[in-house]
């Protein structure tokens, strides 16, 4: 059998987005909306997810499931990745902090939607691989550094939006401090057995409002660098 071409991958990508949109419609009561933002759908269509998984898993890249990427980490299920980005409600002129770059897939999607993406990854090998992939795609509005993502990136704060791709037991206070007034943060909160995808909003007085969206399962947010 001949290898898959970019045309084949584009078909799978379209099917992936259609499946995400179907699930969002089915979960509309929990989500408070039934459709994926058009800009998010377009960004998902634009980013070749198969370039952000290990080569031996390319044929599974568009399945709606998390996939292992090494170091006991995974690339998130497409539905959850799309939902997290959709909840941010990103605008073109905004800056976004991503905590947990992985191999760079969500950073690549965010780069289609925001002016600037700052991404922190604790695994040095992941950061290097993500930089290479993003460079090959010509995405110049993403900057990655190796470090403890729970500390954010104070030099470039405050951020309009923050996306955390690993679970914290409590809302990370340092990240809240780096969130602009009126900003949004999406983060899984809770222990492994009881995580909830949570939307954080910061009001004009610096107080946070939180809404639990749905149960999820993520690896724990690593700290220490």
Image (tube, rainbow, N blue to C red):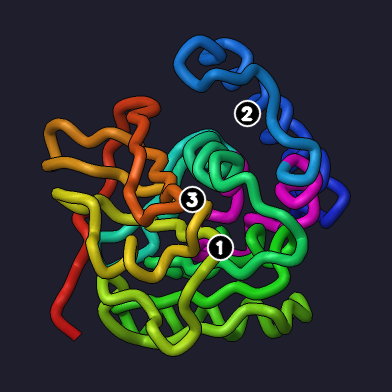
Establish if 191 lies above or below 184.
above
Distance from the alpha carbon under mark 3 to that under mark 1: 7 Å
- Relative image position of residue 48 (x, y in whole percent): 71, 58
Q: Residue at x 45, y 16 (%)?
A: 30
- Residue 33 magenta-drawn? no
- Relative image position of residue 127 (x, y in whole percent): 44, 82
Which residue is identified by label 2? 20
- Relative image position of residue 102 (x, y in whole percent): 43, 67
The local crowd at label 2, few if under 14, some if 14 to 19, many if 20 or more residues have their Cα within 10 Å, is many
Report whether residue 204 is seen: yes
Establish if 18 lies above or below 220.
above
- Relative image position of residue 175 (x, y in whole percent): 33, 66
Report if the CB atoms under discs 3 and 1 are less than 8 Å apart. Answer: yes
Distance from the alpha carbon under mark 1 to that under mark 2: 25 Å
Which residue is identified by label 1? 160
- Which callout, 2 or 3, points at the residue further toward the start of the chain? 2
Q: Residue at x 66, y 52 (%)?
A: 90
């Amino acid at each position: 059998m001949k290898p898959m071409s970019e045309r084949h991958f584009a078909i799978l990508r379209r099917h992936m987005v259609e499946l995400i949109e179907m699930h969002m419609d089915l979960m509309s009561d929990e989500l408070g909306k039934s459709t994926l933002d058009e800009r998010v759908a377009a960004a998902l269509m634009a980013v070749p997810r198969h370039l952000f998984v290990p080569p031996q898993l390319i044929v599974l890249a568009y399945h709606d499931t998390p996939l292992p990427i090494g170091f006991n980490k995974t690339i998130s299920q497409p539905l959850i990745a799309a939902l997290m980005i959709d909840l941010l409600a990103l605008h073109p002129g905004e800056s976004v902090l991503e905590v947990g770059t992985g191999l760079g897939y969500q950073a690549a999607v965010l780069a289609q939607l925001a002016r600037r993406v700052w991404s922190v990854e604790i695994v040095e090998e992941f950061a290097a691989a993500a930089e290479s992939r993003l460079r090959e795609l010509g995405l110049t509005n993403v900057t990655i550094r190796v470090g403890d993502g729970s500390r954010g990136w104070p030099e470039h704060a405050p951020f309009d939006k923050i996306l955390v791709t690993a679970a914290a037991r409590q809302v990370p206070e340092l990240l809240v401090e780096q969130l602009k007034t009126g900003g949004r943060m999406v983060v899984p909160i809770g222990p492994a057995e009881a995580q909830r995808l949570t939307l954080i909003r910061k009001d004009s007085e610096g107080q946070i409002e939180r809404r639990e969206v749905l149960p999820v399962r993520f690896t724990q947010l690593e700290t220490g660098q």
